[in-house]
Image: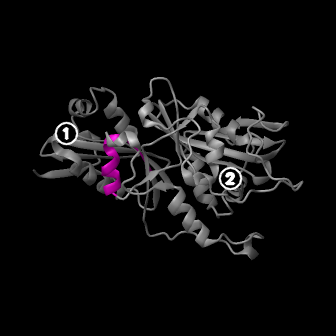
C-alpha cells in the first residue's frame, strides 16, 4: 500500500468521495469550498478525507474525518497529521463521533467538556449529555465580576431582550474593530487580543451580531460556517459591567437563528458552564475534541498591571483551569461507551 496525500479536489473522483460519505452527491462541492481539506489516495483510489472550516486566523473546526473501513484508524491518524501541517498556530476543534474517540486521543486531542451543540430534532441523544449536566469540577468557585453598584453580577438570563435600551445588529453596525478588540480583551480575563487579527477574523466570518447601549458597543459574537452542514460560534463576548443582563444569551440565540447549517457547535471556558447550561436550545456534546497546533509565534505574555490597571492573571490558576476544567482525562469514558 502506497499512500499519497493531496489537498487538490480536482484529483478526486466525485463518485468515490460520495461513496465514502454515504452517497452524498454534494460532498465534493463542500470540500472544494472548505478553507482546508486533505485527501489520501492509495494509488488512484480514494482511501480517506477530512476538511476544515475556518476564518483563517486563529480557530478551525475539523469535520468529516473518514476513511474506508479496510484502511482502519491508521489512515485517519495520518490524515490528521497531514491537515495539521496547514493549521500552524491554530486552536483546532474537531466534531467527531463515538467511533473517533481513540483516533483523536491518539492524535493528542483533548475531549472537550465545555462544548455545546444546537440541539435539533433527529439528533442522536447518545451523542449528547442531558440538559443542564455538570461535571464534578464544574462547581469549582470562580471569582465573579462586580457591577459598578458593588453587587455581584448575576448570570440569570431573566430578560429575553437583555437590559432595557440594549439594541442588536447583524454585523458590527457602528462598532469599530478597535472597540470590538477591547470587548474581547475585557471579557476574556484581560487577555490581550491583536486588533489586526480581530479585524481579519470578524471580516472573514460568515455571521456577526453585536449589541449596543445607545451608541456604545457592549457585546459581540460571530460564526464561521460552510453554509450547509457545520458552523461554529466564536467570540461570544460582553463587557463585564453588562454581564448578567441576558445580552450574551440574546447574542447566541440571534446568531443561532440566522446560521444556515445543520450542526452548530460552540466551545467555551469553564466559567461559562452555568450560562450555556441555561440555554435549552443547546446541549453539551460528548464528541467535540480540541488541540492547539504549535507554530512559530509565541503566545502573548500576560499583561502587567501597569499596562492594564488590573492584576496580572495568576499563572498557577490558569494552568489548573486549563488542565482540569477544559478536558476529560485521556481514556475517560461515559458508562454507555463501555458497551
260 within the magenta span: no
Outermost residue on the left side: it is: 1
Instruction: Identify which residue, 159 or 218, lies in the foreground.
Output: 159
104 within the magenta span: yes
**Highlighted magenta segment, given as a residue range:** 93-107
Residue drawn 65% across the image and 45% down it = 274
Q: Position of residue 145 (x, y in %)?
A: 76, 56
Outermost residue on the top side: it is: 121
- Label 2: few (<14), some (14–19) or many (≥20) C-alpha neighbours in 10 Å: some
Identify the image quadrant of the C terminus: top left
Q: Position of residue 50 (x, y in %)?
A: 32, 44
Residue 131, quarter of the rendered image: top right
Whether residue 43 is visible: yes
Residue drawn 82% across the image and 38% down it = 163
- Label 1: few (<14), some (14–19) or many (≥20) C-alpha neighbours in 10 Å: few
Residue 85 in the figure: left or right of residue 269:
left
Instruction: Identify which residue, 139 or 250, lies in the foreground.
Output: 139
Whether residue 301 is visible: no
Q: Position of residue 74 (x, y in %)?
A: 21, 51
Residue 20 in the figure: left or right of residue 166:
left
Residue 122, quarter of the rendered image: top left
Label 1 close to label 2 by CB (< 8 Å): no
Q: Which residue is labeled 2 in the image?
A: 177
Q: Which residue is labeled 1 in the image?
A: 69
Q: Which mark is residue 134?
A: none
Q: Main SS of the magenta segment?
A: helix
Question: Is 282 rendered above or below residue 202?
Answer: above
Label 1 vs label 2, nearer the camera: 1
Amino acid at each position: 500500500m502506497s499512500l499519497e496525500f493531496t489537498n487538490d479536489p480536482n484529483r478526486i473522483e466525485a463518485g468515490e468521495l460520495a461513496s465514502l460519505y454515504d452517497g452524498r452527491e454534494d460532498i465534493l462541492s463542500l470540500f472544494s469550498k472548505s478553507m482546508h481539506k486533505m485527501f489520501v489516495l492509495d494509488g488512484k483510489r480514494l482511501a480517506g478525507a477530512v476538511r476544515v472550516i475556518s476564518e483563517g486566523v486563529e480557530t478551525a473546526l475539523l469535520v468529516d474525518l473518514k476513511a474506508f473501513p479496510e484502511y482502519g484508524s491508521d489512515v485517519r491518524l495520518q490524515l490528521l497529521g497531514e491537515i495539521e501541517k496547514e493549521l500552524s498556530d491554530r486552536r483546532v476543534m474537531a466534531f467527531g463521533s463515538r467511533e473517533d474517540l481513540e483516533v483523536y486521543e491518539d492524535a493528542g486531542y483533548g475531549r472537550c467538556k465545555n462544548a455545546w451543540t444546537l440541539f435539533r430534532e433527529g439528533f442522536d441523544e447518545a451523542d449528547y449529555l442531558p440538559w443542564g449536566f455538570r461535571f464534578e469540577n464544574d462547581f469549582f468557585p470562580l471569582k465573579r465580576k462586580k457591577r459598578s453598584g458593588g453587587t455581584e453580577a448575576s448570570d440569570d438570563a431573566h430578560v429575553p431582550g437583555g437590559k432595557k435600551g440594549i439594541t442588536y445588529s447583524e454585523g458590527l453596525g457602528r462598532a469599530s474593530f478597535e472597540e470590538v478588540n477591547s470587548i474581547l480583551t475585557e471579557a476574556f480575563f484581560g487577555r490581550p487580543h491583536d486588533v489586526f487579527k480581530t479585524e481579519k477574523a470578524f471580516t472573514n466570518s460568515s455571521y456577526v451580531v453585536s449589541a449596543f447601549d445607545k451608541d456604545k458597543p457592549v457585546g459581540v459574537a460571530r460564526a464561521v460556517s460552510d453554509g450547509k452542514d457545520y458552523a461554529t460560534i466564536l467570540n461570544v463576548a460582553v463587557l463585564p459591567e453588562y454581564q448578567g443582563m441576558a445580552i450574551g444569551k440574546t447574542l447566541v440565540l440571534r446568531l443561532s437563528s440566522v446560521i444556515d447549517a445543520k450542526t452548530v457547535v460552540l466551545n467555551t471556558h469553564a466559567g461559562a458552564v452555568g450560562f450555556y447550561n441555561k440555554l435549552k436550545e443547546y446541549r453539551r456534546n460528548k464528541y467535540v475534541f480540541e488541540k492547539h497546533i504549535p507554530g512559530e509565534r509565541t503566545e502573548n505574555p500576560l499583561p502587567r498591571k501597569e499596562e492594564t490597571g488590573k492584576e496580572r492573571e495568576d499563572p498557577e490558576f490558569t494552568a489548573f483551569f486549563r488542565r482540569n476544567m477544559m478536558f476529560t482525562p485521556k481514556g475517560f469514558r461515559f458508562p454507555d461507551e463501555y458497551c
